[in-house]
Amino acid sequence: MKKSSVLVCGGAGYIGSHTTVELINAGYDVVIVDNLSNSDRKAIEGVCQITGINIPFIEVDCCDREAFRKVFEQYEFDSAIHFAASKAVGESVAKPMLYYRNNLTSLMNLIDLMCEFGRHNIVFSSSCTVYGEPDKQPVTEQTPRKEATSPYGNTKQISEDILRDAVAATEGLKGIALRYFNPIGAHPSALIGELPRGVPQNLVPYITQTAAGIRECLSVFGDDYPTPDGSCIRDYIDVVDLAKAHVKAIGRMIEVADAPRYEVFNIGTGRGVSVLELVTRFQEVNNLKLNYKIAPRRAGDIVAIWADPTKANDVLGWHAERNLDDTLAAAWAWQKNLETL
Ligand code: NAD
Ligand code: WQD
């Protein structure tokens, strides 16, 4: 049976493109909007190739309310997923106004238009960054949010609050904030994946670009942290698993009438992996040698964080399924395939 339609804002991006594939696989129709500020049409082509469906794509800036309204006038959908945001932590420190304007205005426009057109369900891309440096591991949804250490992180906290308050004030509106841990990997087809612009700031794209010879050497930022091997610990979640969490969230909002109207879920594996461990796994699974060196700590890095995903497991019926080795093999396959796209 054909399910309802979902508006995917930022659907040309890394997580949005993978989520679109999983929504289509689950029987939903999708409409994608994106201003391509951090993505490429090729991602849309990849999604269409994987799914065999010509997915409607409208190039629009969600901050341009009148242009965005036309999408609501033209398309029927009852749910929306809001990926459309700027996401580089360092850049947000240098250009805070750009981050506050883009991340908050786009979300507020979406909420306003959803209310104006009587559409019901919003999933928001939040982040484990809202926890800062936690006092206790793993973090649950009850772990207190710490004061944000970057404008980017602050936009995630403020956005969660905006959505919570809008839902509380609007009959019929529902919201789910998914707090992603560290998304990595790519679709097994290697037709879509992460497309960092310029020098990658995140670990796995830096690793794959180093393995491909685009970067000379990976710097491991710090080996003197109070962790078993001295490097930082994160919860690396496969992007396809993460995409499936959105499908579960949409399903819950549509199907479970008595669910709380605003909910928050951690989306992680529940397993902490160190930088050095990840580098070792990448080399072994892909049978290659990575050029890397130990470098000084990176300012602002937290020592360790990993999720307690019990709530998502129990309430959403979602579990991280792919193992780290498969995920790192997919990341490398995507990097190699990029040259051919
Ligand atoms: P991405 O940059 O690949 O995707 C975001 C997409 O939104 C891009 O295609 C970009 O062009 C688009 N976009 C940005 N501003 C827009 C606007 N005003 N109007 C229309 N489109 C706009 O990033 P991603 O990694 O896929 O992240 C998706 C979401 O998840 C973001 O909100 C990000 O903050 C959040 N998140 C990402 C991570 C991560 O590590 N990748 C972790 C936690 C949370
Ligand atoms: C992971 C680990 C680095 C690059 C960021 C955002 C966070 C969230 C996810 C959106 C750290 C180390 C990295 C390198 C390295 N995004 N590293 N050498 O910092 O956990 O989180 O992305 O919400 O908000 O802050 O991810 O991939 O940058 O780093 O040693 O070249 O890899 O020090 O320990 P991070 P990351």
Image (tube, rainbow, N blue to C red):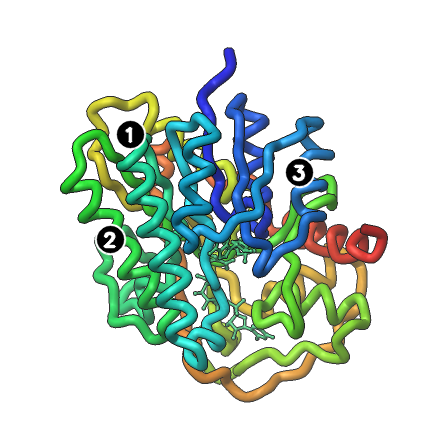
Q: Is residue 265 visible?
A: no
Residue bearing mark 1: 118
Mark 1 or 3: in front is 1
Q: Is residue 204 visible?
A: yes
Position of residue 40 measured from the top left corner of the image (x, y, whole percent): 67, 53
Q: Residues within 10 Å of mark 2 (few under 14, many from 20)?
A: some
Q: Is residue 226 left or right of residue 160?
A: right
Task: State the CA–CA distance, disc 1 to disc 2.
Answer: 18 Å
User: Please, which residue is most extreme toward the top here?
Assistant: 1
Between residue 315 and residue 78, name the one nearer to us: 78
Residue bearing mark 2: 162
- Give the amino acid type for the residue marked by disc 2 in the picture: Ile
Residue 320, compared with residue 274, is above or below; it is: above
- Give the amino acid type for the residue marked by disc 3 in the picture: Val
The local secondary structure at tag 3 comes to helix
Residue bearing mark 3: 47
Position of residue 154 measured from the top left corner of the image (x, y, whole percent): 31, 67
Q: Residue at x 41, y 68 (%)?
A: 99
Q: Residue at x 22, y 35 (%)?
A: 261
